[in-house]
Amino acid sequence: MDPALLQVKNVSKHFGGFTALAGVSLDIAPGERFGLIGPNGSGKTTLINCISGSLRNEGGSIHFSGSEISRLPAYRRTRLGIARSFQIPRPFHSMSVLENLLVPSAYVTHLRDSEGEAKAMEILADIGLADKAHALANQLSQVELRKLELARAMAAKPRLLISDEAMAGLAGAEVDEVLKILFDLNAKGITIIMIEHIMQAVMRFSQRVVCLDAGKIICEGPPTEIVRNPDVQRAYLGA
Amino acid sequence: MKYWIGAVLVVIAAFGAALSGINEYFFYAAYIVLTFVVLSTAWNILGGYAGYVNFGTGAFFGLGSYSAVVLFKALDAPLIVQIVAGAAIGAALGFGVGIMTLRLRGIFFAIATVAILFIMETFMVNWRYVGGATGLQLLRPEVMAPFGSYTRMLFVVMALLAVIAVSIARYIQVGWIGRGLRAIRDSEEAAECSGVPTLRLKLFACVVSGALMGAAGAPMPMYLSFIEPASSFSLNWGVSALAMPMIGGTGHWIGPVIGALLLGSIQQIVTVTISNEINVLVVGVLLVLFVVLAPDGVVGLFRKWTRRFSR
């Protein structure tokens, strides 16, 4: 197996007396499609906040392509190649869709505006938002906002894309649309961590799935095994 | 290019006016209006572009004034040195406020800036060297060669400061720094995850904004031939510096300029024709009207009209 692109070792995080993460370790290989599941409050978003730098982990280490990143501010991690989308879309609402993408292209890839715009239009075309390029971000529909989240993450030229519930609340056909976008990105060599509640989507997408419960990994394996795992069934159904 | 020609013309016009025979009172009033141009432009760099609302403009302004007074009293420093010192001290306070943004956002940041204002005022009230609560009378030095009076000279100095402030604000707005600041205003977390070094940009905005406010305050004691803490650190500076960009439009560098010229002039006219107290009322009423009816200010109204005409 290739050396891991992302190596999370024994990471923990507390909020006051609440243990959000209790020693989580995982390795993610370059080019992998990785699924992260778990019931509400199990620590999924906390874990990816620690990876992307929105939160600092308390114990353990996080290595990205060989170097320790857990003390770097989030913007440095983005520049190294970790991009994410947000569970609740956080567009730059006073800017157009195109301008949203020009933020990472100015700050991460350091493109001049003319080059950045060309690159951004390519990304928007791939993701199916090209016709909305000049619309203000606050005029978009839910599914368009999810796409914008992904498009803006892509404009940072990531090697690792973390998709935090990009499909939550979307209708069936829209889920398929977003799923196809993620498959296409993966085909271009981008490693993807997908956090999702929609089981069907995670199971179709992921090569490997980890299930978190109460801040601990309760099982890990290919999707077919995960759904049959009694611990996972207990965590989700409370049976 | 067009901008720079305009900027040079403004400076030349100010210079020409100061040498002409226009009534002295004009310069006395115009100086205050220009001070507001600097203050609201400076406020807008942090408040308009980055979305951090600063109510403590008076803290920066007053500190600039007091820096000038200390230098004047201790070393007889010339005006230019006083202004540079005011800018430096304003920048230093700006850096401190920038560090605060690490923990304080939104309303909490705004409240903290008010607290800074009161701390500064209390400090000066208790500092004997600069006259404490009663203040200090200052003797203006001799006016420099081409100018007929000290007020005329201060008017040209403030016009120059205004052009510098607006040029800096414009430079920030149109470039990558402005885009980063707007991203911070819209969503700080998303900005950081889009590669924007949010802390550094906020520090930069705070330092530049603070420096300009401090510089604007430095010539004030010479303008009044007097300094005292209550008016130097008045909350009214902060309210005006916030209201003017809101009325003019916060997204564009011209917004605070329009707001300051409009509101500043109305205030001056009202002061002469009606009363000094009604000043504050005018600010309040206009602010409410604009926030309700034209949230994007005069610039926003103008854009709406041009769009309607182009159709």
Image (spheres, coloured by chain):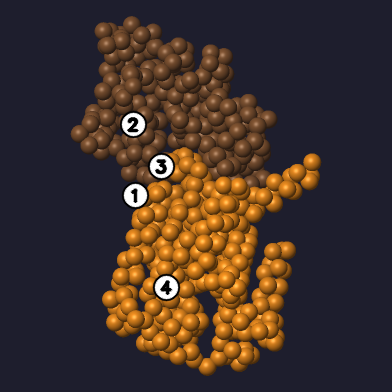
- Label 1: element kind: loop
State which mark lies toward you, 3 or 4.
4
Which chain: brown? A
What residue occupies the far left of the structure in this picture?
Answer: A17
User: Which picture quadrant has residue B73?
Assistant: bottom left
What is the crowding at mark 4: few (fewer than 14 residues within 10 Å), some, or many (at least 20)? few
Q: How far is the residue under mark 2 from the one under mark 1?
A: 20 Å
State which mark lies toward you, 4 or 1.
4
State which mark lies toward you, 3 or 2.
2
The answer to whether the residue labelled 3 contacts the one labelled 4, judged by CB atoms less than 8 Å apart, is: no
Name the residue rendered at 45%, 11% in the picture. A200
Q: In the rendered structure, the residue with mark 4 lies on which chain?
A: B
Name the residue rendered at 60%, 27% in the picture. A127
Which residue position holds label 2?
A46
What is the crowding at mark 1: few (fewer than 14 residues within 10 Å), some, or many (at least 20)? few
What is the crowding at mark 2: few (fewer than 14 residues within 10 Å), some, or many (at least 20)? many
Labels 2, 4: one chain: no
Amino acid of disc 2? Thr
